[in-house]
Image (cartoon, grey):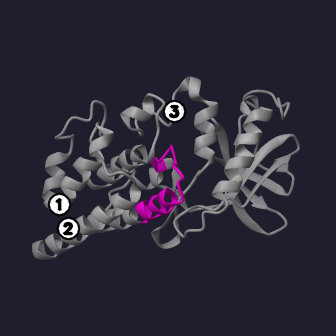
Amino acid sequence: MATGRRKGVRLRARQRVGKYRIEGRLGDGGFAHVYRAMDTIEGVRVALKVPHAELITDEVLRDFRNEVRITAKLDHPNILPLKDASIIEGRFVLTYPLGERSLTDRLQKRISVTAALDLAEQMLEALAYAHAQRIVHCDVKPDNVILFKDNHLRLADFGIAKVAQNTLKGRGTGTVGHMAPEQAMGKPSKRSDVFSAGLIIYRMLTSKWPEWPYEWPLPGHERLRGKVHPEMVRFLKRSLDVSQRKRFRDAEQMLEAFERARRATERYLARKR
C-alpha cells in the first residue's frame, strides 16, 4: 500500500490535512470520500477528494499520474479543473474548485424546460470538447455535474473516473443506473458517455430516471412529448438506444443534434406561450 492508512478512516471537521482544514463531508463513493475544506494559505474553500487508502497501490498511483497529465490539458469553461494532486501525510488528495451544489442536489426540485436545456448544452459542450481530445469520461452522472454561480455547469472527474473504473473493475464499471449496457459489460466508449448524458437530459426534462431494459417508450414519455418538440424526443430516443451502433458516435455529433432539437423546442415553446 502506498498510503498505509486504515480502511474506512474518514477525516473529521476541523482536522488539518497539510494546508487544508476540513469543514465537512460532501459525499462518499466506492472509490473516495469528498470533503469541503478551507485552503488556509490561499484563503479559499475547495473540494477535496480522498480515495480510499486500501485502493491506492503503486500501480494506481502510476495510473493517476498518467491521467492527471492527460486531463490537465483539458481547458474548457464547462470542465472542472483539477487544482492539485498530492500525497499529504500519507493520503492521496485531489483538490478541486468548490461549486455551490451538484446536479444531484439540483434535481431535488423542479427544473424548467429552459433551464434543463441550458444545463444540458453546457454538459454536452464539455463532453464534446473531451471527446475531440480522445478522452472518454466513463462516469457521467449527476454527482459529477457541479453547478457554480448563475447555473454555470462544470463536468468533474475526467481521468479520475477512468482510474476509479479500472481500480474497481471487479465491482463493475461506472455507476449502476447511470451507464450504458455495454459499459456494464466492461466496454466503455464515447457512445457510452452519450448514453449517460442522455439519461441525465431525460431526467431533467421528465423527472423520471429510465431503468433497464430501457425499452421505448420510457417512463415519462408522455410528459416529455407535451413539453418539447418531437425533434428533441427523437434526439433522446437515439441517445438512449440500447444498441450503441444506433447512438450518436460521440458527444460532438450529439451536441450538433441537440442544438437543432433545442432550437426547434424553443420555437415550439414560444408558440405555446
**Snapshot quadrant of residue 201:** bottom left
Magenta stretch contains residue 136: yes
| Callouts 2 and 1 close, C-beta under 8 Å | yes
Q: How many marks?
A: 3
Q: Quadrant of the C terminus?
A: bottom left
Q: Is residue 259 left or right of residue 166?
A: left
Which residue type does callout 2 highlight? Thr
Q: Residue at x 33, y 50 (%)?
A: 198
Label 3 to label 2, Cα distance in Å? Answer: 34 Å
Front-most of 147 and 61? 61
Q: Residue at x 48, y 73 (%)?
A: 150
Question: Looking at the image, is 267 positioned above or below residue 126?
Answer: below
Q: Which residue is mark 3?
A: 173
| Callouts 1 and 3 close, C-beta under 8 Å | no
Using a 10 Å C-alpha cutoff, classify the residue at mark 3 as few (fewer than 14 neighbours), some (14 to 19) or many (20 or more): many
Q: Which residue is mark 1?
A: 231
Using a 10 Å C-alpha cutoff, classify the residue at mark 1 as few (fewer than 14 neighbours), some (14 to 19) or many (20 or more): some
Q: Secondary structure at mark 3?
A: loop
Sequence-earlier tag: 2 or 1 = 1
Q: Is residue 83 left or right of residue 142?
A: right
Which residue type does callout 1 highlight? Glu
Q: Is residue 113 left or right of residue 144?
A: left
Which residue type does callout 3 highlight? Thr
Magenta stretch contains residue 125: yes
Q: Residue at x 87, y 53 (%)?
A: 18
Sequence-earlier tag: 3 or 2 = 3
Q: Position of residue 133 (x, y in %)?
A: 54, 59
Q: Which residue is mark 2?
A: 265
Label 2 to label 1, Cα distance in Å? Answer: 8 Å
Q: Position of residue 202 (x, y in %)?
A: 29, 50
Q: Position of residue 259 (x, y in %)?
A: 29, 68
